[in-house]
Amino acid sequence: MGQSVSRDDFIWTLTEQPHMSRREAIVKKYPEVKTLFGVDPSLKYVVSSMVLFQIFMCWLLQDADWILILLEGYLCGGIINHAMTLAIHDISHNTAFGNKHPLKNRFFGMWANLPIAVPISISFKKYHVEHHRYLGEDGLDTDVPTTFEAEFFTTSPKKLLWLTLQPFFYAFRPLIIYKKAPTDMEILNAVIQISFDLAILHFFGLKSLIYLLFGTIISMGLHPSAGHFISEHYAFKEDQETFSYYGLWNLCTFNVGYHVEHHDFPYIPGRDLPKLRAMAPDFYENLLQHTSMMEILTEFVMNPSMGPYARLKRKPRVDQQFYGNYQLFEYVEGVGVVLIELLIPIVSYVYSGIFSVSSSYWHLPTPEVCGKCVRSQQ
């Protein structure tokens, strides 16, 4: 049922992604753009206000009817929670506290993560680096759909279903395309998030938790906020890899619509991306741009030339790395040494206790050198 898509493969290209060369050209012609690099001082206050607002909504809706819960989840919670995912996107580029304070940015990302009800902040950071560095590269950029998605969701009704299921594809696609070992920071992110969810459940009840979860899931599917998933890199024009959206919905999405500008300069905060475009208009005016999220979603569903295959793709330049970065040890200088110094006497004490029990059972002498060994190592 419905007209089938006309594509039967991705758009394979031998050219490099355009963002690095355009970045160099812009900096050379307009060196003043470097004044935009750095921190958005308002981000931490805006994000914190949104987190607290969602907690307030949980209190407000704890005894509401289910119909109101779902309506508020779509119209209010969905917009805010999707905005929080894009705040996490901005924070992943260290725009909250700067590149000199990566650990502060990671924990602030966990704070922004709380209303979303699902732990995503650290995992998003882990894969998003590859999306920028290896844009469109097979097996490295997990933003590109799998072959199964492209071959199954080929008609308008199926594409509509695919849009509805976007949150699940974004959650599980990396586990298929690019498997990476979980890091201690991801585990910490999950522990903090689950603790928050249990607190919401305990203090406000199931309806409040459903409000948060439903808002997150629905806003990443059939929702105007989710239009940016399609607008950013799906080939509405075959020789253009990234597209920007300049409509009013940017007010709700931390300017994620300025996506060409963002890929050109990932270290410019979302708030300042319109300034970048104003400084270098000749680099952006001739590119195809979007003005309506609903038009983007409608054209994707109805146009037979659009579908999951409508993505530029490249052969990978490097191999996959199973053991990823962004572990706590890499953020805190000397933490490994400190932990070892703390663990040596603990392990020694436990070992001595075990040996004492064994010695009394087997009538063996208890060693007295453990403490000396520990002191000599210190």
Image (cartoon, rainbow, N blue to C red):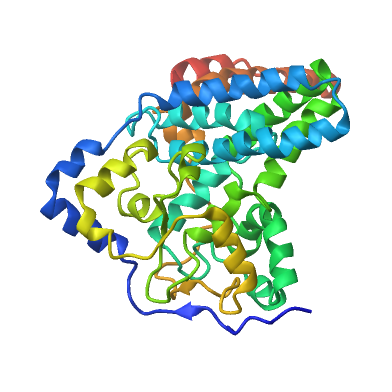
Say left or right for 371 vs 46: right
- Residue 227 picture location, percent across and down: 57, 54
Quadrant the C terminus occupies: top left
- Any part of residue 142 in sight: no
Residue 44 lies in quadrant: top left
For the point 36% across and 56% down, the residue is 260
Q: Nearer the viewer, residue 120 or 60?
A: 60
Q: Is residue 250 left or right of residue 279?
A: right
Residue 99 position, x and y percent, is 33, 34
Estimate the x, y position of residue 82 in percent, counting from the top left: 60, 40
Q: Is residue 253 visible?
A: yes
Q: Position of residue 22 (x, y in %)?
A: 24, 60
Residue at 44% from the left image edge and 30% from the top image edge: 105
The relative height of residue 102 versus residue 151 in the rendered view (above or below) is: above
Which quadrant would the N terminus be assigned to in this image?
Answer: bottom right
- Vertical placement of 294 versus 115: above or below? below
